[in-house]
Image: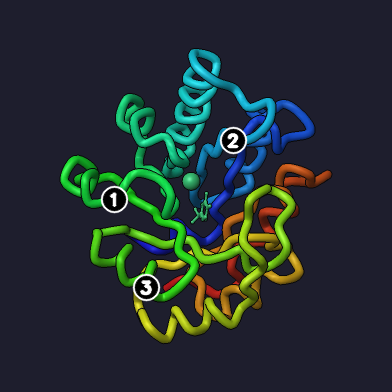
Amino acid sequence: MNCNILNVYFIMGTINCRKDPLETLEEALQAGITCFQLREKGEGSLTGKAYEEFARACQKMCQAYQVPFIVNDDVELAFKLNADGFHIGQEDLALPIFREKAKGKIVGVSVHNSREMEQAILNGADYVGIGPLYKTQSKKDAKPPAGLYFLKAIRKQSANFPIVGIGGITEENANAVRSSGADGVSVISVICHSEDIGQTVKNLLSKKKIN
Ligand SMILES: C=C1C=NC(C(F)(F)F)=NC1=N
Ligand SMILES: [Mg+2]
């Protein structure tokens, strides 16, 4: 997996959006997000057929922009839609079962400590999400902010493994996240609540020329 896809990794569910979610996604794709994760979770989220239809609509849009379409938690749906990949947390189904079946899919895992990091790499994850780095408004059961310390420690432990930071990341702190060792930043609110999504994504994209 090319770690450049982690540069600006937009994560969204219908409840995160203030306007039409597909309009938000389209603007973000036009502005150049490098990866998208559908995270349909929390009070008032879509379920059943409506959820699947919405997922298909997001997937179609990502395909038009050749941006990877990742499904959070719902591995079954990821396979049903033949999504580009899925993202699971420690509490989700054990990855080893899927490693075989997940051939060719991008598999992401949330990690919060070095033991979970080692386990994720052993189980064959393609990237890990580290956070919450700062106070997040998007995840109700988030752990306390880990700050950049943990990100730096994990980067020391795994020099070249694809890592994306998550949790309260904004245009102001995105570069600090990168210089602490992340290959990219994943964001929900800063894009979903932006008055000018195009400008926000541009401000989030890595300034470094990607060689
Ligand atoms: C809880 C999460 C943690 N990290 C990530 C990602 F940024 F994709 F790695 N996604 C999640 N849904
Ligand atoms: Mg999860």
Give amino acid for label 2: Lys
Q: Which residue does the image show at 63% across and 56% down from the upper left?
A: 142
Secondary structure state at the residue bearing disc 2: loop
Quadrant of the image for the N terminus? bottom left
Is residue 60 positioned above or below 211 on the image? above
User: Which disc, if any, is residue 41?
Assistant: 2
Position in image of residue 68 (x %, y %): 42, 44
Rounded to the nearest whole Å, what is the CA distance between mark 1 and mark 2? 20 Å
| Left or right side of 36 for 115 | left
- The answer to whether any part of residue 164 appears in the image is yes
Position in image of residue 4 (x %, y %): 44, 62
Q: Which label lies toward us, 3 or 2?
A: 3
Quadrant of the image for the C terminus? bottom left
Q: Which residue is mark 1?
A: 95
Q: Say whether marks 1 and 2 touch (CB < 8 Å).
A: no
Tell which circle, 1 or 2, labels the residue nearer the N-terminal end.
Answer: 2
Among the 4 quarters of the image, the one containing residue 63: top left
Give amino acid for label 1: Leu
Q: Which residue is mark 3?
A: 115
Single out the residue that lies furthest toward the top.
49
Q: Which residue does the image show at 38% across and 61% down from the upper left?
A: 127
Can you tell me whether the CB of the residue at mark 2 lies under 8 Å from the nearest atom of ligand 2? yes
| Left or right side of 96 for 29 | right
Near mark 3 (Cα within 10 A), the count class, few <14, some 14-19 or many ≥20, is few
Secondary structure state at the residue bearing disc 3: helix
